[in-house]
Amino acid sequence: MNAMRRSSRWLIGSAGIAFTTVFFLVPFAFIFTMAAKDVNEASMLNFSWPAHFQLLENIVAVFQAHDYMLIIAFINSSILTLASVTLLVLLGSMIAFVLDRRKSRLNPLINTLVLAGLIIPPAVVPTIWVMQSVGIFKTMGGLILIEVAFGLSFTVLTMRAFIASIPREIDEAAIVDGAGPLRLFFQVIFPLLRSVVVTIVVVQSISVFNDFQNPLYFLPGDANATVQLTLFNFQSQYNTSYNLLFTNILVITIPMLVMYILFQRQIVAGMTSGAVKG
C-alpha cells in the first residue's frame, strides 16, 4: 500500500512538473522564434523555426528604434526598481518589526489596513488627483512612492512572519547591553533577515521592473518611458512589426528571468522559513 502511494505521488509530481515546464517553456519558445524572423514571416504568427534567422539584426533594430528609447527605458526602469525596492525593504522590515514586537490597541487596525492593501484594487483617478495636488504627478519620485505603496503590504506580511520566528531573548540581551531602538533593529535584527530580504528584493524587483500599468498611468511621456512601455514602439492602429515587438519582449524579459533563476532557492527559503519556524 505504501509503495502504491509513493508511486502515485511520484506520478502526480512528475505530471505537475512536466505540465509546468511546458506551460512556461512553450510561450518562451514562441517568443524566441518570432523574434528571430523577418517582418513578413513574423506577420503570419506561425509557431515555426524562422526560414531566415535574424535575431541579432532585430535586437539592433529594437535598440535603435525611436532614438534609442529602449536604452533610456532601461535606465528609467533600473532607477525605479532600485529606489522602490530599497524603500520597500527598509520600511517593510521596520514596520514588521514594530508590529511584531510592540503590542498596542492599534495593531488590529494596522493589520486590517495591511491586508486591505492586498485585497482592495488601486483607484487610479483619485490617486492621480492626489499626486497632482502635491505636485508629484509625472515625476519619477511620485512613481517610486506609488510602487512602494502598492508593494508594502506583501513586504510587511512576509517580513513579519520571519521576524516572529526570531527569539525575543535576542532583543532583551541587546537592550541590556545598552542598545537603543535603532541600534537594536539595524545592528541586531536586520542582519538576521538576510534570507527574507533576498526574497523581497527578487520578488519586488521583478514586480516593479515588469510593471506596465503604474508607469502608464502615473508617469506618461516618452522621456519617462519604462521598458514595458516600449512595446508601443512597434504597434500602431494599422500596422504591427511582430518580429521587433517579440524581440523587444525577449530583451526586456531576459534580465528578470536570469535574476529569478539565480535566486530561486533563496526565494523559496525566504518564503517558507518564517512559516516553518513560526
Image (cartoon, rainbow, N blue to C red):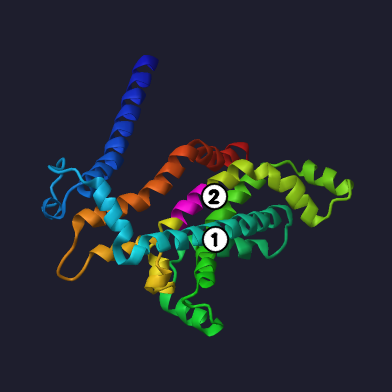
Question: What residue is rendered at 24% in x and 46% in y?
Answer: 55
**Residue 224: image x %, image y %?**
43, 70
Picture quadrant of residue 48: top left
On screen, residue 28 versus residue 146, left or right, reads left
Q: Are marks 2 and 1 in contact (CB under 8 Å)?
A: no
Q: Residues within 10 Å of mark 1 (few under 14, many from 20)?
A: many
Q: Which residue is mark 1?
A: 84
On screen, residue 137 versus residue 36, left or right, reads right
Q: Quadrant of the C terminus?
A: top right
**Residue 265: image x %, image y %?**
50, 35
Picture quadrant of residue 230: bottom left
Q: Which residue is mark 2?
A: 201
- The question of residue 189 being in magenta is answered with no
Question: SS at mark 1?
Answer: helix
Q: Amino acid at mark 1?
A: Ser
Question: What residue is rendered at 50% in x and 74% in y?
Answer: 139
In this orientation, which residue lies closer to the viewer: 223 or 3? 223
Chief secondary structure of the magenta span? helix
On screen, residue 260 versus residue 152, left or right, reads left
Q: Residues within 10 Å of mark 2 (few under 14, many from 20)?
A: many
Question: What residue is rendered at 56% in x and 82% in y?
Answer: 134
Q: Quadrant of the N terminus?
A: top left
